Image (tube, rainbow, N blue to C red):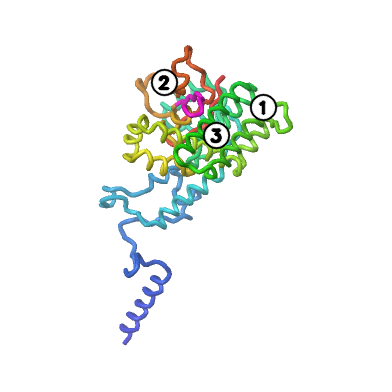
Amino acid sequence: MAKEADASVRKRKAGEEADAGIAGGEGEGPTMPDPSIPEVDPKSSEEGIFGPNPNPSDNFIYEGEFGCSSLCVQDSDIMKHYSDIRAEEAAKIPYLGDKEPLSALAAEFQSGSSILQEKIKLLDEQYAAIRRTRGDGNCFYRGFMYSYLEHILETQDKAEVDRILANIGLCKKTLQALGYADFTFEDFFSIFIEQLESVLQGSETSISHEELLERSRDQSISDYVVMFFRFVTSGEIRRRADFFEPFIAGLSNTSVDQFCKASVEPMGEESDHVHIIALSDALGVPIRVVYLDRSSCDPGAPTVNHHDFIPAESSASEPPPKPRVTLLYRPGHYDILYPK
């Protein structure tokens, strides 16, 4: 009798757990934890669920560690939890930080790779400061936005403003020719043009450095400008599909249309050389990307590599135009650099 009562309790408990969402799919029994996989306790460390590791993907369990044939933890709720934590951590950082000396970057790597430490010393010889961006997948566009507008604010180059406004007009016509309805992008275009014109001094709407930084940290403005860049980038890639198709096939093995829909237009999607080429060509803005990574031809004498993305319209000019935007690339992230 006692055994029957105990069995009844166990059945009822299993049923309550299933009702609470512990069960797997519809019609399945409760999904029991695999004892071979260690549980992760979010409260087990002051640093959070990932402990001191800043890269959550390193905490996933791959084949060979626990005999799994692929990623062991695949539950969509758990993956969403990881994503939410990353987003929460990113939200603690402003879209754009304050200008900092390169010594602040050196402090991050003081106990890290000796190659990176040497490369940061080389950077310090050429660059005066760094301005960090939030690592939310939009860092390239936010860095480009602020760096370019700051360049116009400091140079007051009216001819450059007129030139890029003409290019923006062509970008709009490109999107219209591709079948985009005006209402899908016109607000984003208007917001960027408003910011561009406001950094020219001499009108009632002119703004200062402080106001530019404040606006760039304002989500309602910053996100709209990011979407402006994403539409411009997507339009350029689609317009020159034959040119970009080999690059895209090497990156994602998808069509140009699929790539733009999945990897260019949505907020939060990271940028690669394809995005940079397209944006630089569409707007006619030269961009320098400086690479801070562990690669080095000679470990005894590290060098800092960079690549200048020169717009197609300027590629034949001699000498080539100087970059108007300089970004520091660390794997998966872009920050702004200030040359000396």
According to the picture, the residue beneath numbered tag 1 turns out to be 200
Rendering quarter of residue 16: bottom left
- Mark carried by residue 303: 2
Residue 168 is left or right of residue 204, and the answer is: left
Tag 3: amino acid: Arg
Q: Residue furthest top?
A: 318
Q: Residue type at mark 2?
A: Thr
> Is-magenta flag for residue 78?
no
Tag 2 or tag 1, which sits nearer the N-term? 1
Q: Can the viewer see residue 171?
A: yes
| Number of residue marks | 3
User: Residue 69 location in percent, x, y?
Assistant: 25, 51
Mark before the other along the chain sequence, 3 or 2:
3
Compare residues 136 and 330 and report the one nearer the observer.
136
Q: Mark number for residue 132? A: 3
Mark 3 vs mark 2: in front? 3
Question: Is residue 308 something one can see in this rendering?
Answer: no
- Element at badge 1? loop
Depth check, front residue: 202 or 47: 202
Give the extent of the magenta segment: 281-290
Q: Residue at x 44, y 54 (%)?
A: 80
Q: Residue 203: horizontal and vertical position, in percent?
A: 72, 29
Residue 330's image quarter?
A: top left
Alpha carbons under labels 3 and 1: distance apart = 25 Å
Q: Give residue 54's mark.
A: none
- Is residue 236 placed above or below 300 in the rendered structure? below
Of residues 225 and 123, the one drawn nearer to the viewer in this rendering: 225
